Image: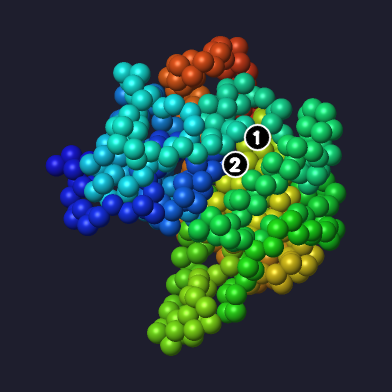
């Protein structure tokens, strides 16, 4: 039995449902453009089924993937607007395949996707009148991100997201900056919605302080300012904090966040959270909900580049923040969070001092000190267990691209992107090696 046949081995849906929407794709190193397509599709119905193509089908029709099928499925499953992921979806969308899952309509962006023969991948569903179009998210694509990696550009960096959203920073005329800021703010509002994609779902804050407070451990208090108000923590929920760069938001970040939620759920189970009486009490007051409220602090571009060098982060703070916001394991986001969560930062939290500060089993950043000394002293620090994706981060993804440069350049060429060239590739290698030596010195205390 083939993988596709195995996926179809279960009983078929009894009928086609207008509100059960189908989207499919590669979803390779998941970014906010992918999430935007899923959000728009979800808003057209009440359920969203997402087909994920196999590594082999993508290689045959498009070129090599950066992330393997398991990693891409993890990213799709983490999107808060997804009802169900379906692996081994055919590259050319087939009517019998989507009908098996009860999906009447297929949704795709306004760009054309072709198979290896140059034919439209959605020709069959279009002919059947079961195709709907949504607008493609501007300013981001997998192709753009690969280009940033290979060219080592920094033009995507944002100095102050707050000022960009207000139309006070950026490129273009005053009117163009204002329009771009409004468009970006609107997208943040969309990504901060609940699982329906229609109602407020997440709190969003800015935190600002001096560069010293953002990069090193100082007791400067800084200031929190609300951007968007979501439902906030519910009665009985524990508020926990995580932080990071979340660059090239991938399976490593996602599994860390999932482990945080699982750890909290296991603790709550022991305390009776899931007992029938407790569940009924919550339902009687509206609806059942999770025992944890996860706040994610996202470091700004300057902070990440201070520690990681080269042209990290590959995604700017706006792009990384959108990736974190769309994740079902996150309830609130703080833009501009400090590299080290100090006591003054944690005790002035908008939701009250967090019950726990979580960190993953590995660190992408080179460290000259312990950034989690304060939560450890406060007795609220906890590390999540090791997991299968713990070594997947922006650095490993860049290395995958570099090792298969010829294949990715061919993929870029097919999309009309000019070849990067050997000199640019060598320059990236030199910068990465310089950064590695610098990190070794930091680690050894030299």
Q: Report the quarter where the C terminus lies.
A: top right
Q: Position of residue 30 (x, y in %)?
A: 50, 40
Q: Nearer the viewer, residue 360 or 99?
A: 99
Name the secondary structure under disc 2: loop
Discs 2, 1 touching: Cβ within 8 Å: yes
Q: Position of residue 323 (x, y in %)?
A: 57, 46
Q: CA distance from mark 2 to mark 1?
A: 8 Å
Image point (78%, 67%), residue name: 348
Residue 265's spot in the image, x, y percent?
A: 47, 71
Element marked by disc 1:
loop
Q: Count neighbours of disc 1 (C-alpha within 10 A) and say few if under 14, some if 14 to 19, many if 20 or more.
A: many
- Residue at figure coordinates x 52%, y 31% from the top left: 142
| Extreme-front residue of the structure | 129
Q: Is residue 255 above or below residue 424?
A: below
- The image quadrant of residue 358 is bottom right
Along the line of sight, which residue is nearer the eye, 431 or 150?
150
Above or below 388: residue 404: above
Q: Please tell me which residue lies in front, 187 or 412.
A: 187
Above or below 382: residue 1: above
Residue 378 is at least partly visible in this image? yes
Task: Write down the quadrant of residue 435 in the picture.
Answer: top right
Q: Is residue 392 left or right of residue 325?
A: left
The quarter of the rendered structure image containing the N terminus is: top left
Q: Earlier in the sequence, mark 2 or mark 1?
A: 2
At x 32% / y 49%, what residue is drawn?
A: 103
Mark 2 sits on what residue? Answer: 247
**Residue named by callout 1:** 312
Neighbours of disc 2 within 10 Å: few (<14), some (14-19), many (20+):
many
Residue 361 x/y as whole percent: 52, 54
Q: Is residue 339 left or right of residue 139?
A: right
């Amino acid at each position: 039995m083939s993988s596709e046949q195995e996926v179809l081995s279960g009983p078929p849906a009894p009928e086609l449902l207008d509100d059960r929407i189908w989207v499919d794709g590669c979803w390779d190193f998941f970014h906010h453009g992918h999430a935007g397509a899923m959000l728009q599709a979800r808003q057209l119905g009440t359920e969203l089924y997402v087909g994920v193509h196999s590594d082999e089908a993508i290689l045959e029709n498009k070129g090599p993937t950066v992330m393997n099928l398991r990693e891409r499925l993890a990213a799709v499953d983490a999107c808060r607007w997804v009802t169900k992921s379906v692996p081994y979806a055919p590259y050319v969308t087939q009517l019998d395949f989507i009908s098996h899952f009860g999906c009447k309509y297929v949704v795709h962006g306004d760009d054309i996707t072709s198979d290896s023969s140059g034919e439209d991948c959605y020709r069959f569903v279009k002919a059947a009148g079961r195709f709907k179009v949504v607008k493609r998210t501007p300013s981001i694509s997998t192709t753009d991100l690969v280009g940033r990696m290979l060219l080592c550009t920094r033009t995507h960096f944002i100095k102050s997201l707050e000022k960009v959203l207000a139309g006070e920073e950026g490129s273009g005329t005053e009117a163009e900056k204002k329009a771009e800021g409004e468009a970006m703010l609107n997208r943040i509002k969309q990504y901060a919605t609940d699982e329906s994609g229609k109602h407020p779902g997440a709190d969003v804050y800015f935190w600002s302080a001096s560069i010293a407070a953002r990069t090193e451990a100082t007791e400067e208090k800084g200031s929190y300012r609300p951007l968007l108000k979501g439902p906030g923590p519910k009665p009985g929920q524990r508020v926990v904090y995580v932080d990071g760069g979340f660059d090239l938001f991938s399976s490593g970040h996602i599994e860390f966040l999932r482990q945080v939620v699982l750890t909290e759920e296991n603790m709550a189970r022991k305390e009776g959270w899931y007992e029938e009486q407790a569940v009924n009490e919550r339902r009687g007051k509206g609806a059942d909900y999770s025992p944890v409220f996860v706040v994610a602090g996202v470091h700004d571009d300057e902070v990440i580049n201070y520690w990681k060098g080269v042209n990290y982060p590959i995604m700017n703070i706006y792009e990384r923040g959108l990736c974190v916001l769309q994740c079902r394991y996150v309830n609130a986001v703080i833009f501009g969070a400090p590299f080290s969560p100090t006591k003054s930062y944690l005790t002035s939290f908008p939701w009250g001092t967090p019950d726990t500060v979580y960190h993953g089993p590995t660190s992408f950043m080179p460290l000259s000190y312990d950034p989690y000394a304060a939560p450890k002293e406060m007795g609220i620090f906890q590390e999540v267990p090791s997991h299968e994706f713990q070594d997947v981060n922006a650095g490993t993804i860049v290395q995958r691209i570099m090792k298969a440069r010829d294949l990715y350049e061919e993929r870029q060429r097919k999309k009309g992107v000019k070849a990067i060239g050997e000199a640019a590739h060598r320059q990236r290698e030199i910068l990465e090696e310089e950064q590695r030596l610098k990190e070794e010195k930091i680690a050894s205390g030299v």
